[in-house]
Amino acid sequence: MKEHEFPRIQAGDIGFDEGVGVSSIIIRMGTKSSYGHCWVYHSSVSTDAEGNETWLTVEAGPRGGLLWRNRTRQPNKVIRIWTDQFEQADILKASEKLVGAKYGWGEIFRIVTRILRIKVRRWQDSPTRVICSNHVAQAALAGRPDLGFYLRFAPFEIWPGELAITLDAFIWDTETA
């Protein structure tokens, strides 16, 4: 098994990695995080001879906005916040419902202003435009509405690293309660 292999990924799980491309670099630099991208897993598509799975995911990217993708790259982190088939289904439905949303360049602009230490008050891109973490936060909230108490930022103003930290805290707190 490879070092970062996650053999028990299921539909509704959330994946994180460093991302690729300029927007992921901006996100990682601007937020001082090792995560520049995240997505929702929907279904396993195929498995090759070595046991590597291809997954159908919903992911946001600069080219095309929020789309269905076939993911073969291994994640750096996988988080499961759903605890039953109803929460799992709600996450998947909310994720799928957002497919087609345009990319949130305004959110990338806001992150760039953080890098440059420029304070922009009351800047907000349209909540209908998303970067990867905006999509995942909305889907996660649909399955686990109690997650809202843990979010320091609105779902359309959160970045991958902050979302990963928040989801980890949420899981730890709800599992140890």
Image (cartoon, helix red, strand yellow):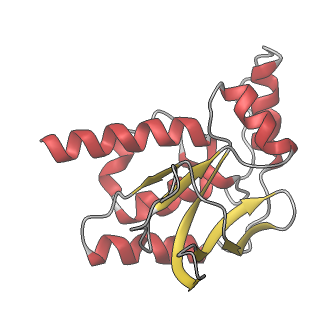
Q: Total number of numbered labels?
A: 0
Q: Nearer the viewer, residue 145 or 12?
A: 12
The percent position of residue 21, horizontal first and vertical second, equals 85, 47
Q: In screen coordinates, is 13 left or right of 134?
A: left
Residue placed at 65% from the left, 24% from the top? 32
Q: Quadrant of residue 24?
A: top right
The percent position of residue 27, horizontal first and vertical second, equals 73, 36
Give the farthest residue toward the bottom.
46
Residue placed at 40% from the left, 74% from the top? 90
Q: Nearer the viewer, residue 137 or 42?
A: 42
Q: Nearer the viewer, residue 49 or 56?
A: 49
Residue placed at 84% from the left, 68% from the top? 64
Q: Quadrant of residue 103?
A: bottom right
For the C terminus, give its image quadrant: top left
Q: In screen coordinates, is 71 left or right of 62?
A: left
State whether residue 34 is above or below residue 107. above
The percent position of residue 3, horizontal first and vertical second, equals 51, 49
Q: In screen coordinates, is 116 left or right of 177?
A: right
Give the farthest residue toward the top.
117
Residue placed at 42% from the left, 38% from the top? 166
The percent position of residue 114, horizontal first and vertical second, equals 75, 22
State whether residue 163 is above or below residue 50. above
Residue 158 visible in the displayed image: no
Residue 85 visible in the displayed image: yes
